[in-house]
Image: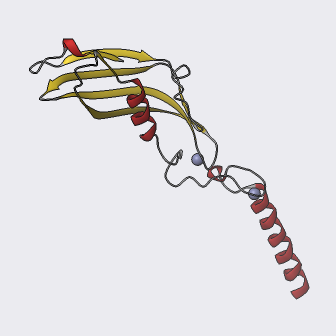
């Protein structure tokens, strides 16, 4: 995203749009992959001695839950502002690195399919969101067997 400094005005925002490929821009992260191109929109104007830009980035993502490893679709939309002092020697303001950094900082710190995800059983690996896992079922079996024995002994 390049802004021609000569095209900026004080009273009207210049609107720029681009689509970014997530792979070529290196935007995928562990547990977060974009499903297709991202839409990047920038509105920029001169404001006194600075260039001021409003930026919005949108895309659809495939997320992987950090607890149960299930994959689910989501969307990401991030709006922010960037301000840059006007330097008479610079003809272009290149925003790409700044936009990429801001976007990556907005990624969720911990990706979860839902807030109370119960994750996988550390012993058998079954998804505990689906109900009782194999080890618990076996434990219950053992308990029932023990109870049966106790009942038999008592009678
Ligand atoms: Zn989960
Ligand atoms: Zn288990």
On screen, residue 65 above or below 124: above
| Viewer-closest of 142 and 5 | 5
The spot of residue 123 in percent (x, y) is 78, 58
| Viewer-closest of 6 and 23 | 6
The spot of residue 62 in percent (x, y) is 54, 31
Of all residues, the one furthest to the bottom in this rendering is 154
Horizontal relation, residue 117 to residue 40: left or right: right
Q: Residue at x 62, y 40 (%)?
A: 70
Does residue 155 appear in the picture of this structure? no
Q: Residue at x 53, y 44 (%)?
A: 113
Asked which colour scheme the image uses, the reply is: secondary structure
Q: Residue at x 10, y 21 (%)?
A: 10
Horizontal relation, residue 98 to residue 14: left or right: right
The spot of residue 138 in percent (x, y) is 81, 62
Does residue 32 appear in the picture of this structure? yes
Image quarter where the C terminus lies is bottom right
The spot of residue 47 in percent (x, y) is 13, 28
Q: Answer with the quarter of the image where residue 16 lies.
A: top left
Of all residues, the one furthest to the left in this rendering is 11
Image quarter where the N terminus lies is top left
Q: Residue at x 60, y 55 (%)?
A: 118
| Viewer-closest of 81 and 111 | 81
How many numbered markers are drawn?
A: 0
Horizontal relation, residue 97 to residue 140: left or right: left
| Viewer-closest of 113 and 128 | 113
């Amino acid at each position: 995203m390049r802004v021609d400094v000569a095209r900026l005005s004080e009273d009207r925002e210049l609107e720029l749009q681009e689509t970014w490929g997530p792979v070529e821009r290196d935007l995928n992260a562990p547990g977060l992959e974009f499903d297709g191109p991202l839409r990047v929109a920038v509105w920029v104007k001169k404001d006194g001695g600075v260039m001021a830009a409003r930026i919005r980035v949108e895309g659809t993502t495939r997320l992987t839950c950090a607890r149960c490893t299930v994959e689910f679709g989501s969307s990401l939309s991030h709006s922010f502002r960037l301000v840059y002092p006007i330097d008479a020697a610079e003809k272009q303001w290149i925003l790409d690195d700044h936009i990429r950094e801001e976007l990556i900082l907005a990624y969720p710190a911990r990706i979860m399919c839902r807030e109370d995800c119960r994750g996988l059983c550390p012993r058998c690996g079954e998804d505990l969101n689906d109900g009782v896992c194999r080890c618990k079922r076996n434990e219950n079996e053992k308990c029932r067997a023990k109870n049966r024995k106790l009942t038999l002994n008592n009678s």
